[in-house]
């Protein structure tokens, strides 16, 4: 029986996350989620089970509510890097989930790197 798109996405997401966990070395995880209307990212401490910093296009202060394009993704990445610095985080690893590292995901990652995050 053929797998659905959702099942294939979940398999891809878990495959990426499990490979990254092997090389995590106690670093935080920068997790990205993209929907048709919004994009969000958060820094997660898997050992304690808490979110250290987060940013999303749903926030009014970013000025891009309901917008899901490359510019909005770059704003989210920059804001997340700013909040991570305020929380004292510099190193993390990038968990792209089941999404391809292209377009909006790449723009978010590049903006976070420019903001001072190392991954």
Image (spheres, grey):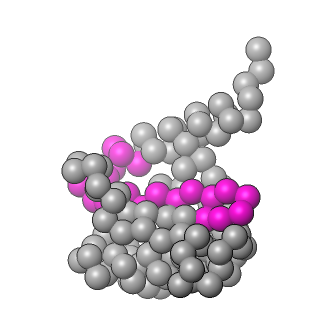
What is the quadrant of residue 66 in the picture? bottom right
> Count of labels shown?
0
Q: In the figure, 41 relative to 48: above or below?
A: below
- Residue 94: image x %, image y %? 45, 61
Residue drawn at (51%, 38%) of the image = 15
Residue drawn at (36%, 69%) of the image = 53
The furthest residue to the front: 60
The furthest residue to the top: 1
Q: Left or right: where does residue 111 sit relative to residue 66?
A: left
Q: Is residue 104 visible?
A: yes
Closer to the camera in the image, 12 or 47: 47
- Residue 70: image x %, image y %? 69, 76
- Residue 111: image x %, image y %? 53, 80
Residue drawn at (73%, 25%) of the image = 3
Q: Left or right: where does residue 90 sit relative to residue 62?
A: left
Question: Does residue 118 belong to the magenta stretch?
Answer: no
- Residue 26: image x %, image y %? 23, 54
Q: In the figure, 12 relative to 80: above or below?
A: above
Image quadrant where one finds the N terminus = top right
Q: Give, as a single range, the part of the protein colored magenta.
A: 20-39
């Amino acid at each position: 029986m053929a797998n659905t798109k959702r099942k294939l996405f979940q398999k891809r997401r878990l495959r990426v996350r499990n490979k990254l966990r092997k090389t995590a070395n106690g670093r935080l995880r920068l997790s990205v989620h993209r929907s048709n209307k919004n994009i969000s990212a958060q820094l997660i401490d898997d050992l304690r089970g808490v979110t250290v910093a987060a940013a999303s296009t749903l926030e009014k202060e970013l000025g891009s509510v309901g917008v899901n394009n490359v510019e909005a993704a770059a704003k989210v990445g920059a804001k997340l890097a700013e909040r991570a610095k305020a929380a004292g985080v510099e190193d993390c690893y990038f968990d792209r989930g089941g999404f391809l590292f292209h377009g909006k995901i790449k723009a978010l990652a590049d903006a976070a790197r420019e903001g001072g995050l190392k991954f």
